[in-house]
Amino acid sequence: MGNQFIMPGKIVYGENALAQAKPLIADLGKKALIVTDRFMVRSGNVRPVEELLDDLNIGYSVFDGVNAEPTDTIIDMGIQQYRDEKCDFLIALGGGSPIDAMKAIGAVATNGGEIDDYYGKIISIPTPPTVAIPTTSGTGSEATQFTIITNTKRDIKMLLKGPVLMPDIAIDDPKFTLTAPPSITAATGLDALCHAAEAYTSRKAQPLTDDLAISAVKRIFKNLPVCYAEPKNIKAREEMSLAALEAGVAFNNASVTIIHGMSRPIGALFHVPHGISNAMLIKECFRFAIDGAYSRFADLARAINVAHHADDDRTAAEAFLNACCELCKTCEIPSLEEYGIDKGKFFEAIDKMTDDAIDSGSPANTIKKVTRKDIIQIYKNLWK
């Protein structure tokens, strides 16, 4: 049986990648909507993009209304600005949120209606040209056909998809990640780890995604602690940018599994940043998942040298789980209680979160069969 493998149209990566991408941007359109957030504007990260567009005599309008968890109302505002300013292509600068927002704005710009209309459907009408410039190393959104937008009416995170959402150009320049504070570095880096490990242990894994996923896991374990302790280490930042890109391409084609399925409802209902909620789930979700995929988790353990080839697969798989837990400790990931979530309210929401997790489809990609009862128990285990 054949496998399909999808990647961005063009990828430019490494230090000074933005400058190298200039000829690619020159012919995209006459006016860009730069989709970003206020921190990117204040930190000066938007300015190099503006200067590049000025040099190309391309107009632009900056939409900086994106927050950490983009909602349908934010998308509505972005679409309105895109139309009012008569833009004809989009550039996203920021973490996964601005990139996700750009994709959603582009989808509605050409497909019409509201972003909520596309939940559960494949978006098929091409968007305007899109350029993704990540400033964090984790979400991999610059390399995927997915976008996650919060539906404020239903209190759910909508996973929207379609090959047309894949950015035309992905620019991974590590210099843009130097302004990320340690907390963001940790959250996004562990998000990338989940992308890679889940892609490798997914029912949809294939040889091409396997190679990328293992490479990403190796880079992350080596470089994330360095980036967390030394935020200005450009070499480690470049390695993490590559890891996030590899992990993004991997899960774009192999999908994610139980962690992401259970993480989105926590983010939607309790406003926990995506990478943090993923990291909170690593221990319990992987403890559950390794039982059905010892050999796959063992491969990851051997790749990062926490297990020997002589070790049996179960021992090696458990070593990988322990290594993930230690990395979470190094990155100072809080528990639900430490984050300030009320236990009573969390338990009241478990039924809804379980429904939403199952509806996302992600848990079903786990090699071990996941039941409703399993998900409920894992949510409860987070408070042990």
Image: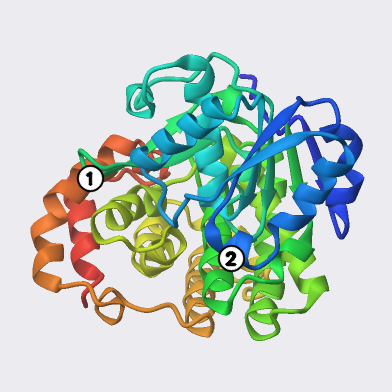
Asked where in the image residue 336 lies, by quadrant, the reply is: bottom left
User: Would residue 205 be seen by someone viewing this image from the given angle?
Assistant: no
Q: Give the position of the N terminus as an image quadrant.
A: top right
Image location of residue 205, percent across then percent down: 57, 39
Q: Is residue 275 above or below residue 154?
A: below
Q: Secondary structure at mark 1?
A: loop
For image coordinates 64% across by 80% down, the residue present is 225
Q: In the depicted view, which residue is nearer to us: 365 or 233?
A: 233
Residue 192 in the figure: left or right of residue 308: left
Q: Using a 10 Å C-alpha cutoff, classify the residue at mark 2 as few (fewer than 14 neighbours), some (14 to 19) or many (20 or more).
A: many
Q: Is residue 273 above or below residue 200?
A: below
Asked where in the image residue 37 lies, by quadrant, the reply is: bottom right
Indicate the amino acid at tag 2: Gly
For image coordinates 47% across by 50% down, the residue present is 66
Tell us which disc is closer to us: 2 or 1: 1
For image coordinates 29% across by 52% down, the residue present is 268
In the image, which disc is placed on residue 155?
1
In the image, which disc is placed on residue 322?
none
